[in-house]
Every structure is written in structure tokens, then in C-alpha cells.
């Protein structure tokens, strides 16, 4: 590929190609886990319960369980006077049926006694010994939670393809679902290429740089629920790199390599992919940063591996991951929806400038102010070589092709990134 001009694909076309290549995990990729390990996992099967919610008619208020027919005409001048025949705390099974002229003292969450159909809150009553005066009429069935009003046993409680959050786990616990069928976590191999790279614990020599990509991409994959497989640094040697890639595609669903995808004398990735039988779908995208992007697939009878050859520049690598790899990993993981990139309209606090020849992403922070989003451009130089001001990035502002300026105060489309997306 050395010296050859490579046609750049528009960003949306590249996104469409990538997402069409993704084959989501299926039932054969499911595993059973305990509920305690379910947070963040994606359901592989619908969950049902044999319990109704509520499990029984119960009180939504501290007060008195009564028959509406006994109180429908009362007021403070002519209160209904009822005999208290039972006290029902939460967790207690009522022993009495409420007859005409009777009431039961009841507390929030307690089982409604037979015969009663309404709860009068205690603020609208006055107790005198074993009698209660109802001072204000209630509507029929007030403050009564009916059995199965929230959920009916045997119907779908949670659908497949959702990532389980804390409220979901609470629902499953309440439904006594102690084990879950979830998709396994996608395996993502990560390797860095370049003679100039050293590990984080090595002393730097002139011309060397730390391989920050290995750590950044591992964190990126873990945040998305994948299993990062760090394969380390591979030198600019075609034979070594081919061996490393061949190893990666045997263990992973997705391979992320950084470096070696431009048109330099030591950029071997595309040739190696061809040698190994990959089908290359993308070689370059009209985006800044991140123009050199190789996307390929390896297909076997058993599986398909998606390969991303990312730029070696750490900023370009992360921007490429946020824009292209993230939706692919979300779809692969089995999410039913919500995996496509989501852009937010925000007001820019700063002028956003670019050359206009490629779709440009400028990093900074999203802020929600009085219900509206604002974007604040990261300070300092916005060269893709400046990794430092990428810290704490929560959004990428998009300047479209053909536009060189979005002025402060104008609207801009922003891609949320990191923990905000």
C-alpha cells in the first residue's frame, strides 16, 4: 500500500458498513450467572415470574381498612363511627373479616383484610378507645394496591437485549429470580505496534513514547462490558506482527490494533490482513482526527472476527473508538437497541474551528444547565498529538464537512463519550 492514495469514505457510510458487519451474540453465546453478578450484563432470554406484583391487596397508607359503604356519607359534623376489630402490621396475615360497622387498624404494605375495600388515612380519623371516627369521606378503593396491578404472573417481566441496571436487579430480586441467562462478555484483543513504544514502567530513551493505547483501550472495552485481552507491544516487524494478529483472531470476537495502518514504509497491517485471508471493508475515513482506519473481517464456519486497525496516535485512536468501535461493541454484545451513536444538540461556549475538508471532532465537556446542554471546548492545543487535554472529555463536538466555524453561542451536535454515553 506504500505511496498509494486511498479513497476516504464519508463518516456515515463508514458507520453503516461497520454496523452491518457486526453479528450480535446469540443464544448459543449465553451463560447463566447468579443475580449478584448480573449488574451490567445483557439479558439473553426474557424473564418471567410466577409472582404477581403486588402479591396481594395491600395498604398504601397508614390508616384504617374499612368498607366504603360504611363511610360514603360521613363528614366532620357526622363522622362514621366504626369498631376496631384488628390491628394489621406489615407481614401479618389478617385473622378477621371486616363486617358492616367495623374497621381494622392497618399500616403501609400490610395485607388488606377480607371485607374491606378502602383505606382511610389516619390524618382523616380520630381514635377513641376501640372505636375510630372517620371524619372525611374517601373515594372507593382509595390507598389500596390491588394484587397484580403492577405485574401479572407469567407475563414478560424484563425483555432480552437490555443491560441490567440497579433498578432491574432490584426487580429481579423481588421476583425471586436468583439466576439469569445473559450473553457472555465480548472478548476484545488489544495490541500496539511500533518500535518507539515502551511499557509504562520502562525508562524513556530519546525518541521513545509510552504505549498509552494499551491502557486506554483496555479501559474503554471494560467500560462497555467487554473483556480486554491485552497482547502488548509488537515491533515493526512484518513477521512478528502477522504472528500476533493470527493469534489474536483465534481468541477474540474483536481485535483492536493501533498503528501500522497509514501508508508509511513500516505500515504492514493491511498487507498482513490480506495474507491471513481477511476481507478489508474500510481503509480510510474522511474524519479528523482518525483518518487512517482499517476495518476487516475474518470469517470461519464457527465465528466471525471483526478487526479494527486504529491510528497509533492516542487521541485519534480514542476518537475512532468512540465514533466507530463503541456502537459496534454495543451491538455485538447483544443489546436490542440503543447501540447506534446518539448525538445531543448543545450550545457551544466557544468558537469551534477546523479546516472543513473532513468531518471534525473537537473534544471537551458537556454540561446540562437549566435543562439545556452546553459544550465547553477543552483548553490548549487541539492537535491530535495533544493527549493531555483529552482528560475528562465527556463530549465530541462535530463540525461537518464544508464548515470551518461554529461560533460561540451557536448550536452544535455533540457525541457524548465516556461514562456519559
Image (spheres, rainbow, N blue to C red):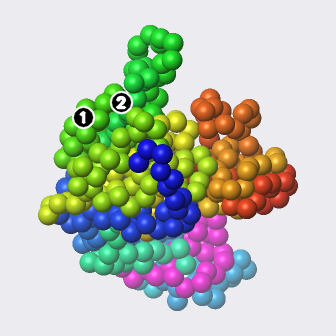
Percent coordinates x, y for residue 384 in the rendering: 61, 38
Query: Counting other residues with Cα less than 10 Å from the Cα at mark 2, is it few (<14), some (14-19), or many (20 or more)?
Result: some
Percent coordinates x, y for residue 72 in the rendering: 60, 88
> What residue is shown with label 2?
236
Report the magenta residues as a range.
Answer: 112-141
**Residue 116 can be seen in this image:** yes
Dot 1 falls on a residue whose secondary structure is helix
Q: Which mark is residue 377?
A: none
Residue at (83, 58) in percent of width and height = 410
Q: Is residue 357 above or below residue 98?
A: above
Any magenta on residue 136? yes
Is 231 in front, or is 75? 231
Query: Counting other residues with Cα less than 10 Å from the Cα at mark 1, is it few (<14), some (14-19), or many (20 or more)?
Result: few
Any magenta on residue 305? no
> What residue is shown with label 1?
239
Is 150 in front, or is 83? 150
| Furthest residue in direction front, as rendered | 3
Is 145 in front, or is 190? 190
Distance between the alpha carbons at the discs numbered 2 and 1:
9 Å
Percent coordinates x, y for residue 243 in the rendering: 22, 37
Amino acid at each position: 500500500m506504500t505511496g498509494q492514495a486511498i479513497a476516504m469514505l464519508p463518516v456515515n457510510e463508514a458507520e453503516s458498513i461497520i454496523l452491518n458487519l457486526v453479528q450480535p451474540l446469540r443464544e448459543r453465546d449465553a451463560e447463566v450467572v447468579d443475580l449478584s453478578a448480573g449488574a451490567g450484563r445483557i439479558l439473553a432470554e426474557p424473564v418471567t415470574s410466577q409472582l404477581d406484583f403486588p402479591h396481594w391487596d395491600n395498604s398504601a397508607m397508614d390508616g384504617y381498612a374499612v368498607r366504603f359503604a360504611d363511610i360514603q356519607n360521613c363528614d366532620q359534623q357526622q363522622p362514621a363511627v366504626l369498631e376496631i376489630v384488628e390491628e394489621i402490621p406489615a407481614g401479618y396475615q389478617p385473622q378477621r373479616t371486616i363486617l358492616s360497622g367495623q374497621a381494622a387498624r392497618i399500616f403501609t404494605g400490610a395485607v388488606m383484610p377480607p371485607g374491606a375495600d378502602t383505606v382511610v388515612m389516619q390524618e382523616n380519623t380520630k381514635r377513641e378507645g376501640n372505636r375510630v371516627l372517620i371524619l372525611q369521606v374517601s373515594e372507593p378503593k382509595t390507598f389500596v394496591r390491588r394484587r397484580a396491578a403492577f405485574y401479572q404472573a407469567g407475563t414478560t417481566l424484563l425483555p432480552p437485549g437490555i443491560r441490567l441496571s440497579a433498578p432491574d436487579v432490584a426487580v429481579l430480586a423481588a421476583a425471586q429470580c436468583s439466576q439469569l441467562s445473559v450473553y457472555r462478555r465480548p472478548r476484545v484483543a488489544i495490541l500496539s505496534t511500533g518500535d518507539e513504544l515502551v511499557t509504562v514502567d520502562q525508562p524513556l530513551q530519546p525518541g521513545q513514547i509510552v504505549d498509552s493505547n494499551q491502557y486506554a483501550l483496555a479501559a474503554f472495552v471494560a467500560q462497555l462490558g467487554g473483556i480486554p485481552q491485552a497482547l502488548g507491544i509488537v515491533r515493526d516487524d512484518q513477521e512478528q506482527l502477522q504472528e500476533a494478529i493470527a493469534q489474536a483472531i483465534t481468541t477474540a470476537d474483536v481485535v483492536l490494533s493501533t498503528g501500522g495502518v497509514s501508508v508509511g514504509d513500516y505500515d504492514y497491517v493491511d498487507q498482513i490482513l490480506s495474507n491471513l485471508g481477511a476481507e478489508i471493508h474500510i481503509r480510510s475515513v474522511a474524519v479528523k482526527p482518525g483518518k487512517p482506519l482499517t476495518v476487516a473481517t475474518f470469517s470461519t464456519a464457527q465465528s466471525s472476527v471483526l478487526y479494527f486497525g486504529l491510528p497509533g496516535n492516542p487521541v485519534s485512536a480514542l476518537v475512532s473508538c468512540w465514533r466507530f468501535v463503541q456502537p459496534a461493541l454495543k451491538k455485538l454484545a447483544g443489546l436490542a437497541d440503543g447501540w447506534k451513536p446518539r448525538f445531543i444538540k448543545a450550545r457551544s461556549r466557544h468558537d469551534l474551528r477546523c479546516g472543513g475538508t473532513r468531518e471534525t471532532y473537537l473534544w471537551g465537556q458537556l454540561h446540562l444547565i437549566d435543562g439545556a446542554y452546553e459544550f465547553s471546548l477543552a483548553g490548549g492545543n487541539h492537535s491530535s498529538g495533544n493527549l493531555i487535554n483529552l482528560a475528562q472529555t465527556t463530549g465530541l463536538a462535530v463540525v461537518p464537512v464544508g464548515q470551518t466555524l461554529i461560533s460561540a453561542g451557536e448550536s452544535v451536535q455533540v457525541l457524548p463519550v465516556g461514562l456519559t454515553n
